[in-house]
Amino acid sequence: MKNKREYGLVIGVLILLFSGMFQLEMAGTPGSEIEKIKSRVSEYFTALHNGEVEIARELIHPQSRKSKRAGQLGDSSIIAFNILRVDIEEGGNSAIVEISREALGPAVVGRITVKEKYRWKLVSGEWFFDPNDTPMSDSLIFRDYYHKKNADRATAKKNGETPIPLEVEFDKKLFDFGIAIKGTSLKVKFPFDNLAKEKIKVEKIFFPEWFIKDVTKDRNLKPGESGEILLNVDTSKFLGDVRQDIFVQFEPIKELIKLTIEGEVYREEDIPDSRKKLVRKELVK
Amino acid sequence: MRAKAKFLICALLTLGLLVPVANAQIVHTVTQGNEEVVQYGLNEVLGEVRLTTVSGTTIASTISITYSGADIANLPTGYPVIAAGVITYPNGITLTCTGGYATSCNNQATKITGSNTAAGGQIIITIAGSLSPAANDLLSINGVRADVSAKAVAATVGATIQSTPSNANLFNIVSVTVATVNGTMTATTTAVTTKNCVAATNPSIKVSEGFAGSFVEHTSPTANARSRYGATLDTTVVLAVTGLPTGVTLSWPTTIVASGATASGATLVLAAGSTSAAATYGFNTTDQSGSDAVQESFTITPVVTVTLGSAFAQSTITADVGPAVATTFPGYGAPVTTAANFINNTKCVTYMLFPFVTCQKTTGFTTGIAIANTSKDDAAFGGLVTSGGEAQSGAITWYGYPSSTKTADGSSGTLGTVITTITSASLAAGDVSSVTCDAQTGFSAFEGYVIAKADFQFGHGFAFVLGKYNTGSTFDVAHGYLALVVLDPSVTARTTSTGGESLGQ
């Protein structure tokens, strides 16, 4: 009888752990919030894809449901989507969801992959899409932070005016790795100084993920501090000349800086002795 | 009185002894040859040292000739050949004795020995006593070889002449210059860039003597051979190509005639055993004196063959004078030329021009770009042999040139810098890459033209500009165009009349 009571207690505890209590604990972690958001995002786009506009509308932020933008969401020829990234914003009440959508384009190009960002907000414990508060897309970041800012700076300089000061200074913007032996992974480093009077953050680095990996350690810098962008470059897929631009986004100063990696990749047996000195062994990871 | 007598006796004795000594002293006039020697030479022939008799009678003595700072490479050892006053040692040094010295040399009462000392190589002439050479009879030393490999161009080798005992021989001068170092050889290279898909152009290397007498043929010149002084070999030119990529071969010409401006009948002849990456040429001449009168140069142009599957690399060439040995004569030490670029084998590429590409600069408008690698054509054209092609794969890199915001009169505003990104690491033959431009690194909000470089031949491109014109639509504006194939400027320069802008498309 005593044993039965003990077994009962153990089973009860286990039930509690694997039901409500456990779930409550997990709900507080960012990982589970991200899964919840992903689930809601999937629900939303699946409803759109199925033409279930009313179901989709239920997933829109209550204050934005009647807006014009919410009404446009049903007109889509989306055939597939993929959630690329979910970033919970500071405070935990909103998140930026980056998705790629496959749409049917006219004629030859056929399926078009379009990357988009949306903001989802937490209301009474549930996540809702807010079409009236869209985050900056990559194209807007490039347009405002890079193309426009650089053009303005160049124009000011041309007109003899003081250009908008650059608040991040890189030692050099071109990293020439010389000659690399095909198959090696290279450590690429771009040191820089924070010239701003405020804290800055390396918000995002834009690079092709299939051969470059971001291993930057410190992303937050106080005024006057120095930092470095650290990347690993996989040379296994190349032969010959390699040249690739990467872009570093700094916030809140709204800067997007272009850096370039270049060099040559050869099989070890094809590198002449006279050029072997150009193989920088210290870069090999 | 007794002291006076002693003084008188001493004086008489002294005079009696000195008179015969003064009669036995030989007075020599020293002359020499200042020979041009080859830099990096390990055993160069130094100039002749001549001791010409002015007057006197010999007493048994030695005369040492010290070659300052230059070790003798062919010290006189072994049994010499003696003929008519000329003693020739096996290693090439000769002592020539004329007139009153000849008989003494023939029976080796007058002879030479040699050694290397801290001060330099030394030749010691042993002179028999009681010889009475006539005026202009001479003793001369020839064929001394010395290592000058550590000396720079224009450095000299001096010889110091001393007598033991010192009063046995008098010299008008005791220090002479017997050699001046001159340049060995120079080489200038005309490098080329080859491509794995087109007939290669040939590089060349021009080698020139450092001075007229630098190159020598000892073994079988037709006329006017130089004295060998122990030499058994001819000058060679050694070419070494480093880093020749797999699939690139060189065929070296067998005979090179000296360049027109310095024609002397001399040739360089390819030695047996030469390979694609290592060629050795021997110097041949019909008249060594004639060759020594002109500074010869030779332009060597190998024929390059490149296979489509060749590797890509920069190769370099060195040119050295040889043989690189110290034990046989002549011989050379340090390298003559540093490595110079020779052949840079690169990929065949296709450049495709997309004159207008917009990538979400205006929200909702983007461009799809498709690039086909049509180098796989065997089925369509009936096989690789008939089509002349071969499947190639390679990366695709975009170079985007952003357009400026125009001023009110339509003039260009400030231009942005080129944006470069790799859109494919390797596109196989027979495949098509199709991407939207705003998804490529750095191309968000880009608008301008793009030159795509595909690392394969027969690439063709198609662009499709898409846009959301009507509110709420996905895409309702679309227009496509073919990319223009720009001829590879490294094969056909864009500046030529038939160059890259004669697209013919």
Image: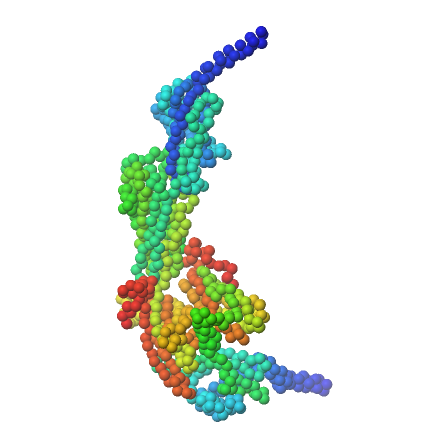
Say which residue appears at 43% left-offset and 56% top-offset: A275
Q: Along the horizontal axis of the image, is A189 left or right of B234? A: right
Query: Where residue B235 sits in the image (x, y, percent)?
Result: 35, 41
Colouring scheme, one of rainbow, by chain, secondary structure, one colour: rainbow
Query: Where residue B45 sits in the image (x, y, percent)?
Result: 39, 35
Compared with A49, B232 (above or below) is above
Say which residue appears at 51% left-offset and 60% top-offset: A282
Q: Nearer the viewer, residue B157 or A215?
A: B157
Q: Is residue B41 visible?
A: no
Query: Where residue B478 sits in the image (x, y, percent)?
Result: 35, 82
Name the outermost residue toward the right. A2
Q: Quadrant of residue B289?
A: top left
Q: Is residue A255 visible?
A: yes
Say which residue appears at 44% left-offset and 18% top-offset: B24
Q: Quadrant of residue A125?
A: bottom right
Give the total of numbered labels.
0
Compared with A158, B236 (above or below) is above
> In which quadrant is the N terminus of chain A drawn?
bottom right
Q: Nearer the viewer, residue B455 or A60?
A: A60
Say which residue appears at 51% left-offset and 66% top-offset: A170
Name the outermost residue toward the top. B1
Query: Where residue B87 sits in the image (x, y, percent)?
Result: 38, 27
